[in-house]
């Protein structure tokens, strides 16, 4: 919300995640606000979300927050989280749509087709 400078309320998100959503998509750092949730806080939140919910984390601008802020290692070990890491922005590949996805093998295999 505008009142809190568009920051994500992690406690509220954790409460809402209990409604058994199929998918929660998070953009971190957020575009266009630039708001960033530190890696440690995101990992804590993601561990609280029910395992029946898949999490898609878009990390298009994570390099601007610091390479240590990426959740790709967390996603690779997770059973429910995937981290999408587009390369076109940070490497100035204007017009190129290049990215890689980190996550559990089960989810990646389902997305392959």
Image (cartoon, helix red, strand yellow):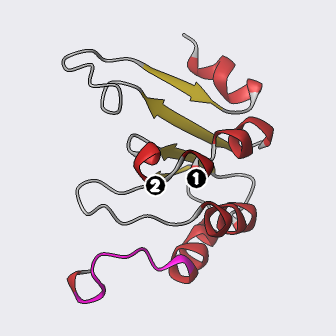
Judging depth in this view, the residue of 78 and 90 nearest the camera is 90
Residue 15, compared with residue 108, is above or below; it is below
* Residue annotated with mark 1: 69
Q: What secondary structure predominates along the stretch shown in magenta?
A: loop
Q: Which residues are magenta?
A: 3-10
Judging depth in this view, the residue of 108 and 83 nearest the camera is 83
For image coordinates 62% across by 60% down, the residue present is 39
- Mark 1 nearby-residue class (10 Å; few <14, some 14–19, many ≥20): some
Q: In whole angstroms, how far apart are the C-alphas of marks 1 and 2?
A: 6 Å
- Mark 2 nearby-residue class (10 Å; few <14, some 14–19, many ≥20): some
Image quadrant containing the C terminus: top right
* Residue annotated with mark 2: 65
- Callout 1 touching callout 2 (CB < 8 Å): yes
**Residue sticking out furthest to the bottom:** 3
Residue 1, quarter of picture: bottom left
Residue 112, compared with residue 16, is above or below; it is above
User: Could you tell me residue 37's position as x and y percent?
Assistant: 50, 66
Q: Secondary structure at mark 2?
A: helix
For image coordinates 52% across by 73% down, the residue present is 13
């Amino acid at each position: 919300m505008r009142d809190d400078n568009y920051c994500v309320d992690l406690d509220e998100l954790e409460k809402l995640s209990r409604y058994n959503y199929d998918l929660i998509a998070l953009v971190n750092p957020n575009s266009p606000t630039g708001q960033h949730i530190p890696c440690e806080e995101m990992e804590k939140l993601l561990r609280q979300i029910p395992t029946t919910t898949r999490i898609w984390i878009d990390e298009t601008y994570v390099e601007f927050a610091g390479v240590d802020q990426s959740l790709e290692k967390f996603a690779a070990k997770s059973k429910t989280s995937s981290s999408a890491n587009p390369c076109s922005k940070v490497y100035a590949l204007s017009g190129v749509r290049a990215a890689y996805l980190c996550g559990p093998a089960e989810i990646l295999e389902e997305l392959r087709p």
